[in-house]
Image (spheres, grey):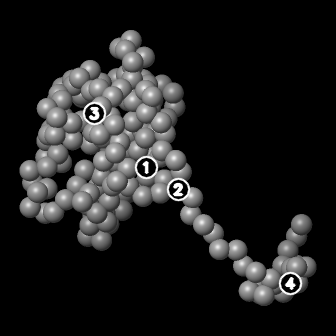
């Protein structure tokens, strides 16, 4: 099975969705967290987390997404707060990071970001025997998008369903 080569459209779409470069101008991206390498302490913690996630049968895609989320956090903390290892992260740092993440994401992206962070920090706290810096930070509320319901006048099918072509022949 061969991989489908990436097109320019998919590459630009991925760049637009990048959590690290969201909301930045082109001139500031080169000096941003995206170019900051994570330290060996973060790499070591991520490696341990990945092994634990694999042992719990997490999908490779989920592991990659969580790694991306934690790596973005590590880079941001390094550039903005001079944090070079996970054991230096405090609740205040996580509150600032979550506030920033919540502003950059829409709908379920906020909840996904929180869940990714929570999974890593719960594992890290259990591994190190410390309290998670994400402890006591509540999960964001889900954004509920209203759905327009058709009225009887707007609905093209009568209540019996006979107005839909092919529905009467559908096996039950």
CB under 8 Å between discs 2 and 4: no
Residue 125: percent from left, percent from top: 39, 19
Q: Earlier in the sequence, mark 1 or mark 2?
A: 1
Point out the tag, 1 or 3, that comes first from the N-terminus: 3
Picture residue at 21% right of the left edge, 41% below the top? 76
- N-terminal of the pair, mark 2 or mark 4, is 2
Instruction: Give the residue pinned by disc 3.
Output: 93
Apparent side of residue 97 relative to residue 169 in the rendered image (left or right): left
Q: Is residue 63 above or below residue 159?
A: above
Please indicate, yes or no, whether residue 64 appears anywhere in the rendered image. no
Q: In the rendered image, which residue does mark 1 sit on?
A: 110
How far apart in space, not on screen, are marks 2 and 3 (Cα)?
24 Å
Does 110 appear above or below 48?
Answer: below
What distance separates the C-alpha of mark 4 from that of mark 3?
A: 57 Å
Picture quarter with the N terminus: bottom left
Does residue 132 appear to the left or right of 11 in the view shown? right
Classify mark 3: helix, strand or loop.
helix
| Residue at 34% across, 37% down | 95
* Vertical arrangement, residue 172 with respect to residue 88, above or below: below
Above or below, 83 against 127 in this view is: below
């Amino acid at each position: 099975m061969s991989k489908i080569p990436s097109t320019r459209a998919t590459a630009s779409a991925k760049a637009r969705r990048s959590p690290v470069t969201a909301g930045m101008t082109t001139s500031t991206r080169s000096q941003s967290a995206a170019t900051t390498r994570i330290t060996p302490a973060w790499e070591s913690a991520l490696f341990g987390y990945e092994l634990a996630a694999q042992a719990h049968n997490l999908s490779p895609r989920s592991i990659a997404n969580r790694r991306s989320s934690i790596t973005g956090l590590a880079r941001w903390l390094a550039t903005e707060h001079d944090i070079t290892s996970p054991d230096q992260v405090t609740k205040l740092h996580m509150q600032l990071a979550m506030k920033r993440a919540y502003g950059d994401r829409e709908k379920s992206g906020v909840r996904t970001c929180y869940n990714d962070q929570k999974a890593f920090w719960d594992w890290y706290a259990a591994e190190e025997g410390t309290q998670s810096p994400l402890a006591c930070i509540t999960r964001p509320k889900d954004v509920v998008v209203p759905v327009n319901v058709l009225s009887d006048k707007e609905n093209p099918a009568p209540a019996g369903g006979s107005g839909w072509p092919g529905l009467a022949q559908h096996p039950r």
